[in-house]
Amino acid sequence: MDFKKRSTLTVLGAAFAGAMIGISGAAIAQEHKAASFISGGPTGTWYPTAAAISEMVNAHYDGQPVTTIPGKGAIGNPLAVGAGKAQFGLSYGPFLKLAYEGKNEIYEREGFENLRMVANIVANTVHIVLADNLDDDVFDKLGDGGQINIGVGQKGSSNNFAIEKILQSYGFSYDDLTASGSNVFEGAQQGQVDAFQNRQLDIYTNTVGMNSGDLTQAMSARNGRVLSLPDHVRETMVTKWGYVPFDIPVGTYDGQTEPVKSLNLSTVIFTTADMDDEIVYNMVKDMAENHDRLIAAYGGFKTWKPTDLPIGHPIPTHSGAVKYYKERGWM
C-alpha cells in the first residue's frame, strides 16, 4: 500500500489554482510504501516509544504509512528487519552490531550488512556496585586467587550480557570464576538487591537508568559505590561489543566526588539501506524537534538530549539520518 505526502499549495490566484488543481490546498501526490516499526511487547516501554515516533512521521502523509507492531525484543528485532519482515526496529547497540556482522555467538548466520542505524535514543548505564569492604582492583585480584560473590542478573538479559563481557575483558568467564571458588548468581534484579543487602553478594550489578530504585536501595544498604572501569575494559566493550563510553557525573550518587567511568547500553532505531531518505530524515527531525512528545511516551527521555541521536552508532548510519545530522552540525 502507498500513501501520499501531505503538502499544501500556496494559491496565487483562484482562477490559476482552479485550472491547475481544481481546489486550493490540494495534496501533491508523493507516494510512500507502508512500513512496519517493530518494537517490544505492548506492556513495555518500547511499544509506546515506537508508536509515538510513528505517529509523528505519519503526520507528514495521508494515511498511516508507519505502523507499530510488537516484537521479540533486542535480539529478535534485527532478524525481523534484516529478513524484510519489518522495515524499522528497536534494539540495543551491541545486538545490532552483532546482527550486522553475523557469525558470532548471538547470530550464527551471515550478517545483515544491509542494516543501517537511524538514531540513538534512551540509554541504560552499566553499574557495578561494590560493597564498602571491596577495593577497586577487586577484579584484577581474581588472577591471584581472589574470590567474589557477584550478581549478574537474569540469564539472557542485557545486564547479564554486559557483565559477562566485562569480566571477559579482565580475562575471566563465568565458568572460570565458579571453578576458582567464586559465586556467580543469576536471577531477577530484586532478588539480587535483597542478596546484596543480606551480604550474600559482594557485588551488585544492573544495567539501568541512573538513580533507579534498585540501585539506590542497594547502595544505601552497604555504603556501596559504583566501580570506575579501566580504560582498556571500556575500549574493548566499545570496539568489540558496541557499547558507548559514558562518565556518570559527579554527585549522581551519595558520596560520589569524581566522575565514574562506565558504559551506556544504547537503545537504537534502525532500518535498512534501501529505505528512502525522506522518511528517515523526517523521523530523526521529528524526534529532535519534539522532545516533549517523546517524554510523554516514555519518561526515560527526560535525561536524553536530541544531540544524542547521532552518538555511538555501532553500524553505518542511514543516509537520510546523516543528511539531517549534518544540517544540524551534529556530524
Image (cartoon, rainbow, N blue to C red):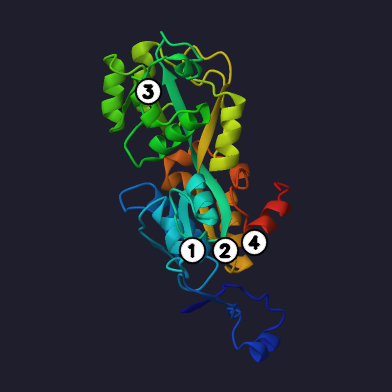
Q: Please determine whether, in this image, residue 7 is positioned above or below residue 15.
A: above
- The residue mark sitting in front, 3 or 4, is 3
Residue 240 seen in render: yes
Secondary structure beneath dot 4 equals helix
Of the two numbered discs 2 and 4 on the same chain, state the one appearing first in sequence.
2
Q: Residue at x 57, y 61 (%)?
A: 113
User: Mark number for residue 114?
Assistant: 2
Q: Residue at x 45, y 27 (%)?
A: 127
Crowd band around label 2 with a 10 angstrom C-alpha radius: few (<14), some (14–19), many (20+): some
Q: Amino acid under label 1?
A: Gly
Q: In the shown orientation, is residue 203 left or right of residue 301?
A: left
Q: Amino acid under label 2?
A: Asn
Q: Amino acid under label 4?
A: Gly
Q: Amino acid under label 3?
A: Tyr
Name the residue tied to disc 3: 204
Of the two numbered discs 3 and 1 on the same chain, state the one appearing first in sequence.
1
Name the residue tied to disc 1: 82
x and y, in percent, of residue 182 in the image: 35, 20
Look at the numbered discs 3 and 1 and tell me whether their residues touch, using CB distance below 8 Å. no
Query: Between 212 and 7, which is closer to the camera in this rendering?
Result: 212
Q: CA distance from mark 2 to mark 3?
A: 38 Å
Q: Please determine whether, in this image, residue 53 is positioned above or below residue 234.
A: below
Crowd band around label 4 with a 10 angstrom C-alpha radius: few (<14), some (14–19), many (20+): many
Query: Between 1 and 166, which is closer to the camera in this rendering?
Result: 166
User: Mark number for residue 320?
Assistant: 4
Of the two numbered discs 3 and 4 on the same chain, state the one appearing first in sequence.
3
User: Mark number for residue 178?
Assistant: none
Query: Between 268 and 235, which is closer to the camera in this rendering?
Result: 235
Of the two numbered discs 1 and 4 on the same chain, state the one appearing first in sequence.
1
Look at the numbered discs 2 and 1 and tell me whether their residues touch, using CB distance below 8 Å. yes
Of the two numbered discs 2 and 1 on the same chain, state the one appearing first in sequence.
1
Secondary structure beneath dot 1 equals helix
